[in-house]
Structure formats: C-alpha cells, structure tokens
Amino acid sequence: MASSCRKDLGLLALRVGTGGVLFAHGAQKLFGWFGGHGLEATGAAMEAMGFVPGRQSALAAGLGEAGGGVLLALGIATPAAGAAAGGAMAGAVAVHAPAGFFAASGGYEYPAFLGFVAAGIGLAGPGRFSFDHLTRHHLDQPWVLALAFTGSAAAAAAVLRRRAAGRSRTDEDYGLDPDD
C-alpha cells in the first residue's frame, strides 16, 4: 500500500473514531441520547460547575462536541471542526483538572486527549477520503485554520476566565450574609 494512501486511511480512522466519540458526548448534552441528561439537566449541572448561564453553556459545549464531531468524521471544514471540538474540550479539562491527570481518578486525561486529537486533525487536514477533498478544500484553507483556532482559543479563554471569576467570589459578593 502506498505511503500516501496509508496516511489518508489513518486520517480517516482518526476522524471517524474521534468524531464519533465527540458526537456521542455532544448528543448526550443536547438531546439526552446515549444515557445523557439533555439540555436542561446538563445546563443545571454546568451552572453548578460555574459555567453561567448554564443552559447556554450546555448548548455551546454540546454543539462544539456534536457539531465538531460530525464535521470531523466527514472531513468538512476540518480546521473549524477541530478548533470547535478542541475548544469545547478545554472546558471539560478545566472541570476535571482538580482531580489530577488520570481518568481513573476523575482527572482530565480523557477530555484532554480528545481535544488534542481533534485539534491535531484540524491542523493536519482531513486527507483524501473527505468532503473537504471532494470540494477542493474550499473550507480547508489557511485563513479558515487561523480564524477558527484563534476564535476558539479566545472563546475558550473567555469562558474559563468567566468561570474562574465566578467561582472565586465570596458570599458577600452575592449580597449574602456570611454569618447565616
């Protein structure tokens, strides 16, 4: 088998596997599929984790995962798909970070891995077995890559900054009496 064909088959396998996992996680948040809780319950959970407003945060995370996953799997707008999924995983990493690295202890290993793989595919490109290739890479251009990764990084940083600021407030900041 030619080396370029092997590379393209490898990218296809990575795209479909990673995209499928990301889609499933996003569908749990958005629709309650695959044992998930749906948008309302996920929104309440995200609000409890410091992502305010919770429902909009759940919608953004679900769309980043499910939408980015589908686009990655199909190889459509691959830089934007990888950036969206990678950005969504940044929030998941922040939630799991206090538990350390390893997933066995509730750590961030798994979401970090998904984020790195999605971002890596977005950077490397989808390969020949993709819709991007069929459309002559119309949505797989250097400017799309730069815009998508810059936008995703800025959005993830803003969300995480807002979460950190909200979690560091005291009861007094919310008008509550700390002696109650």
Image (cartoon, helix red, strand yellow):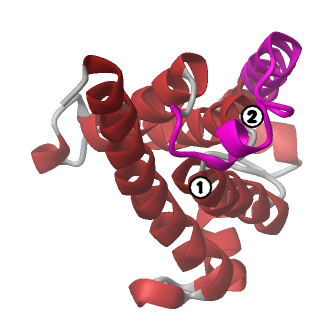
Q: Is residue 38 above or below residue 6?
A: below
Magenta part of the chain:
127-155
| Residues tagged 1 and 2 counted as in contact (Cβ below 8 A) | no
User: Which image quarter is the N terminus in?
Assistant: top left
In the picture, measured across the screen, residue 77 lies left or right of residue 139, that is left
- Residue assigned mark 2: 80
Say whether residue 98 is visible: no
In the picture, measured across the screen, residue 19 lies left or right of residue 99, that is right
Q: Main secondary structure of the magenta part?
A: helix
Q: Find residue 8 and report its horizontal and vertical position in percent.
A: 39, 33
Q: Please report the residue visible at 62 percent of the width from the left and 63 percent of the height from the top.
A: 66
In the picture, measured across the screen, residue 32 lies left or right of residue 52, that is left
Q: Is residue 114 above or below residue 44?
A: above
* SS class, disc 2: helix
Residue 13's tag is none
* SS class, disc 1: helix
- Residue assigned mark 1: 74
Query: Which label lies toward us, 1 or 2?
Result: 1
Q: Find residue 65 and report its horizontal and vertical position in percent.
A: 60, 55
